[in-house]
């Protein structure tokens, strides 16, 4: 969505250096996840807590690995022939993998993104068997090179019809290649309006879908709008356990980060709208996030955020609010 594109390149911060050792990947051999020896965040069984981290936003060391189950590194960009553009800030990705392993956190590569609304590379590569095969090979190579746990496909967006059929073919071939190697396959999908290009056949091919339930609703990403969007996907046949509820760590219309909003006034952490520079800026405050998490515990498969570098810290952390709500429900 628009916020994702804007903030993917806003902040260029130095990557801290650490010496944490690598641990082995623990993905299952048929696409199902296996609990690692050192378990990920102590969340209810099967409940995902997913955070996106961009090449330029924040540092690897700042990610709260002890409260997450998955980190999606964003983005690998496709070329029209199926190959990939050079990955940005590989040192950060390598450090994320090192820091995530002791916590049992899965690290995946997110592919695509908004790309200024130009999905022509995906449309072209997915149109031929050769293009799809080259893309699958490139992604498997990237997963192997960096010791990743899988791929998060973020084609924004396949259209209904021929485009949707080609997306299904691509996802089927990715599923075979990745699941056959014990890796994961997920996808980031529209909250609702642009989701029709994802055919129900895809639901069986993925481990879960990250539903981008933000950049919509009045006020922005409110609870009722979010529930309706997730239920739309479930109504099309998506199993509840594969429906991961996305939340924004920023406001609309000006894309102020949650960290910035809290820094202006700590009381903003408990609000959903506030006037800044004469504009009504609406976002998800901590009570909103707790409500959504409670709903997801009963009706979905997890929570996802865009993006980690936008979160406040300490008492006002949105990641912490989600984590504490989920773990309280599980008795952890």
Image: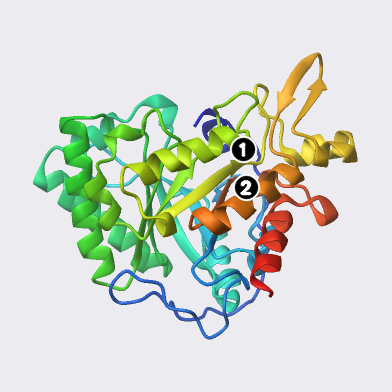
> Tag 2: Cα neighbours inside 10 Å, few (<14), some, or many (≥20)?
many
Decide: few, some or many residues near mark 1? Use Cα within 10 Å; few <14, some 14-19, many ≥20: some
Q: Is residue 309 above or below residue 62?
A: above
Instruction: Specify which label sits upstream in the sequence, 1 or 2.
Output: 1
Residue 106: x %, y % from top left? 49, 67
Q: How many marks?
A: 2
Q: Quadrant of residue 127?
A: top left
Residue 332 numbered mark, or none: none
Where residue 49 sits, quadrant-wise, is bottom right
Q: Nearer the viewer, residue 139 or 187?
A: 187
Q: What is the number of the mark on residue 292?
A: 2
What is the secondary structure assignment of the residue under circle 1? helix
In the image shown, does 327 or 162 lie closer to the viewer?
327
The residue depicted at 57 percent of the width and 26 percent of the height is 217
Q: Is residue 83 left or right of residue 300?
A: left
CA distance for labels 1 and 2: 7 Å
Q: Is 332 left, or right, of 179 in this rendering?
A: right
Secondary structure category for the residue under label 2: helix
């Amino acid at each position: 969505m628009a916020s994702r594109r804007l903030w993917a390149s806003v902040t260029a911060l130095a990557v801290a250096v650490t010496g944490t050792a690598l641990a082995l990947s623990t993905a299952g051999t048929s696409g199902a996840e296996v609990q690692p020896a050192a378990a990920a965040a102590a969340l209810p069984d099967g409940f995902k807590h997913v955070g996106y981290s961009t090449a330029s936003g924040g540092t690897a060391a700042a990610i709260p690995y002890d409260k997450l189950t998955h980190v999606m590194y964003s983005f690998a960009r496709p070329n029209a022939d199926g190959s990939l553009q050079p990955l940005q800030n590989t040192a950060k990705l390598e450090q994320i993998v090192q820091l995530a392993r002791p916590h049992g956190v899965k690290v995946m590569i997110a592919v695509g993104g908004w790309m200024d609304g130009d999905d022509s590379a995906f449309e072209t590569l997915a149109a031929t068997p050769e293009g799809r095969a080259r893309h699958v090979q490139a992604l498997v190579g990237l997963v192997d090179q960096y010791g990743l746990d899988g791929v998060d496909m973020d084609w924004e967006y396949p259209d209904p019809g021929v485009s949707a059929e080609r997306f299904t073919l691509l996802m089927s071939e990715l599923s075979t290649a990745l699941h056959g190697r014990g890796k994961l396959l997920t996808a980031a999908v529209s909250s609702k309006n642009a989701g029709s290009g994802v055919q129900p056949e895809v639901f069986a091919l993925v481990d879960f879908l990250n539903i981008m339930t933000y950049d919509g609703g009045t006020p922005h990403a409110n609870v009722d709008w979010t529930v309706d969007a997730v239920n739309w996907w479930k109504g099309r046949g998506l199993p509840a356990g594969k429906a991961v509820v996305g939340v924004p760590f920023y406001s609309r219309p000006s894309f102020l980060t949650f960290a910035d909003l809290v820094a202006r006034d700590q009381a903003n952490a408990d609000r959903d709208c506030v006037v800044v520079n004469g504009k009504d800026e609406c976002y998800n405050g901590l009570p909103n996030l707790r409500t959504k998490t409670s709903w997801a515990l009963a009706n979905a498969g997890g929570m996802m955020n865009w993006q980690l570098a936008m979160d406040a810290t300490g008492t006002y952390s949105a990641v912490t609010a989600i984590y504490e709500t989920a773990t309280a429900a599980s008795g952890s």
